[in-house]
Amino acid sequence: MTNGPIQEDLGRRFAALHESGCFLIPNPWDGGSARVLESLGFEALATTSSAFAFTLGRGDGGVTLDEWSNT
């Protein structure tokens, strides 16, 4: 199974955000803050590996993919 068409649609939606000029893209530090920002109406969110790692008391690059995907 592939996420090709879904990813293409997400890419088009993200590109459309740029058509009206600048837009604000917040950078949540964990899953909870991402959900809050989404509920506030932000259509796109940045990602930061270091901020999430710091919430766990680790340095950047110190979180496994399994830990990241379970947030």
Image (tube, rainbow, N blue to C red):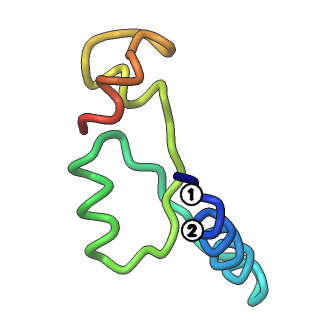
Q: Position of residue 55 (x, y in %)?
A: 27, 25
Q: In percent of the image, x 37 and y 80: which residue is there?
A: 41
Q: Position of residue 60 (x, y in %)?
A: 49, 15
Say if 46 sits above or below 41 in the image: above
The disc label shown at residue 6, or none: 2
Which residue matches tag 1? 3
At label 1, counting other C-alpha atoms closer than 10 Å, the crowd grade (few under 14, some 14-19, many 20 or more) is few
In what element is the residue under mark 1? loop
Nearer-the-camera pick, 46 or 65: 65
Q: In percent of the image, x 30 and y 41: which residue is there?
A: 30
Dot 2 amino acid type = Ile
Dot 1 amino acid type = Asn
Residue found at the very far front of the displayed protein: 1
Q: In percent of the image, x 48 and y 29: which residue is there?
A: 49
Say if 63 sits above or below 30 in the image: above
At label 2, counting other C-alpha atoms closer than 10 Å, the crowd grade (few under 14, some 14-19, many 20 or more) is few
Confirm or deny contact between disc 1 and disc 2 (CB under 8 A).
yes
Say if 57 sits above or below 32 in the image: above
